[in-house]
Amino acid sequence: MMLWLFFIALAVKSGRADDVVILKKDGAEASIHRHGATVISWKVDGRERLFLSAASKLDGSSHIMGGVPIVFPKFADWGPDRPFHGFARISRWDLVKAQDGKAVFELKDSEVTRGYWNHSFHLEYSVTLEPKQLRSALRIINSSPTKFDFEVLYHTFIRVQDVRNISLSGLQGLKYKDKTRNFDEFTETRDVLKIQGFTDSVYQNTPKIHNITNTIDGQTLELKKSGLPDLTVWNPWSEEIKTFSDLEPNEWTDFVCAEAGHVFSQIELLPGCDYEASQTLSIL
């Protein structure tokens, strides 16, 4: 609790007073930072459900390491002098409204974004809080005179008491690329996935619902997604985490990233058309 309050206070102190939008609904609470429109906290029954690194910067100088960052228009590395995982997570979003447990943000192309990706676009992003649920919905609008291709992903950091004790369902029989093994392709044979070492795998055509067991106080978290056929599972483990300046060396036990996305293939969007991608996190 004190750590979470410290992060919120730091965000306000190091930036503008309106940097963090706080939603409340029947005892649940969520906080969204306008830098990246990143959900940095989600509390149910007084317990934090998202991981935010103690080493993460909240002053707008870098991406936020934790919560629910938005990856757009490209996943991972997409060329020299371009921001890893795209620019959406390092852009300051405009707040459209915040009321009744819901906040709406928007991001439009600018001279900066066109320097990386020369297209006109409009992103509309809503975060809706319910007593035991957090819903994120992103609408991508092509306002260019020509079509464009993109990738999108929610880089969700789920807080757990010990990543070695969790399991993730719904991946058996699916193809995946394993970045820890030269990005080679494999077929998942395990009925449930357990994190037992450095994990960085992208699963293709996954179910709409995944359950992650034994997160906090033995509870199960359900991840339900729409418009996002792929799922990336990531944890740096004890050695790889040392390569990250925005993660503390002992934090690898505290989270698992279950990232709903459309990254195995690109989405082609025609002028004037839109694409919607959403995820809902629920405590069962």
Image (tube, rainbow, N blue to C red):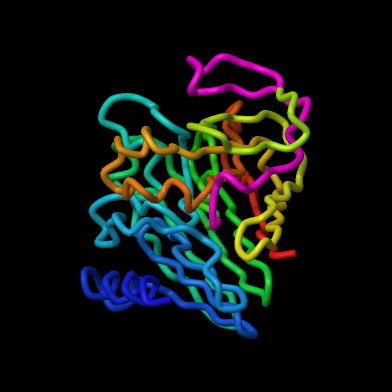
For the residue pair 48 and 156, the one nearer the viewer reads as 48
Can residue 8 be seen here? The reply is yes
Horizontal and vertical percent position of residue 180: 48, 23
Q: Is residue 163 magenta?
A: yes
Looking at the rendering, which quadrant does residue 27 occupy?
Answer: bottom right
Quarter the N terminus occupies: bottom left
For the residue pair 173 and 38, the one nearer the viewer reads as 173
**Residue depicted at 43% across the width and 54% down the height:** 66
Q: Is residue 126 magenta?
A: no
Horizontal and vertical percent position of residue 57: 27, 57
**Residue depicted at 47% across the width and 48% down the height:** 253
Horizontal and vertical percent position of residue 144: 48, 41
Q: Image check: 38 left or right of 169?
A: left
Q: Image check: 279 left or right of 196?
A: right
Quarter the C terminus occupies: bottom right
Magenta span of residues: 160-187
For the residue pair 193 and 134, the one nearer the viewer reads as 193
Horizontal and vertical percent position of residue 56: 31, 55
